[in-house]
Amino acid sequence: EDKVVQSPLSLVVHEGDTVTLNCSYEVTNFRSLLWYKQEKKAPTFLFMLTSSGIEKKSGRLSSILDKKELFSILNITATQTGDSAIYLCAVLSWSGGGNKLTFGTGTQLKVEL
Amino acid sequence: GAGVSQSPRYKVAKRGQDVALRCDPISGHVSLFWYQQALGQGPEFLTYFQNEAQLDKSGLPSDRFFAERPEGSVSTLKIQRTQQEDSAVYLCASSVDRVGSAETQYFGPGTRLLVL
């Protein structure tokens, strides 16, 4: 059974801190790993990672994938209160004639003033 | 439309009642997915359509859950004889998903179902 594990489960930091969120996975027929940010609504897409060792960046957020060790990290620098959310890691795999996303339980990040 | 839409946004049902949740995917998106997200958990896969064909329904928790997408666009998730454990947010997502690709899934706002 496909499995995605995120750590830590929750985190409280102060504005300006840097955080690193972890995601490890065990899936068959891996295609890509995705990071989503979920506030009170639907998950919104952050990154899709397909190749090992290539960092993706968007502003203060960056992410990298290690397909040998089966993990990814999401870094957020100079955190702001608006970064408070649940960060979901998901792995896209090929299953039953199509693509399937398996999610981790998420990391709940709270950024305080 | 601009994104995936779902209705209703909130639904309160009495235990034993049937409910129907609707998803309108992004126009032109071939693939449509349903997920169930319990409080404090990540979304869990329920079922997947490619056009009107339901290719994977391995995540449906029981035979009380049924999904359809008869014309390959709008989809309905039906839950019969709802139970309290069905209370969750039901998320729909769609993707362009050419066969063999790894397209991003875009999520709707979800339907929050509360069964009393």
Image (tube, grey):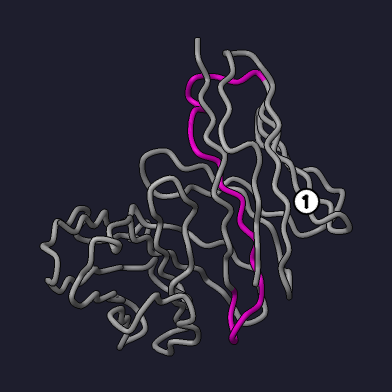
Across and down, in percent, residue A87 comes to 55, 41
- Where is residue A91, by image quadrant? bottom right
Mark 1 Cα-neighbour bin, 10 Å: few <14, some 14–19, many ≥20: some
Q: Is residue A69 left or right of residue B71?
A: right
Task: Read off the residue under disc 1.
Answer: A71
Q: Quick one: A32 or A106, which is closer to the camera?
A: A106
- Which amino acid, mark 1? Phe
Q: Is residue B104 above or below residue A81?
A: below
- Which residue is painted at 74% across and 41% down in the image? A73
**Which region of the structure is painted magenta?**
A78-99
Compared with A84, A31 (above or below) is below
Residue B104's place in the image compared with B109, above or below, is below
Q: Residue furthest top?
A: A113
Q: Secondary structure at mark 1?
A: strand
Horizontal and vertical percent for residue B30? 47, 78
Q: How many marks?
A: 1
> On the picture, is B55 further left or further right than B80?
right
Residue name at image x 35 percent, y 79 percent: B62
Mark 1 — on which chain does it sit? A
Asked whether, in this view, residue A84 is left or right of residue B72, the answer is right
Looking at the picture, how far across and down is residue A48, in whole percent?
67, 54
The residue depicted at 59 percent of the width and 75 percent of the height is A99
Q: Is residue A81 magenta?
A: yes
Query: What x and y, as percent, mark residue A71?
Result: 78, 51
Q: Quadrant of residue A61?
A: top right
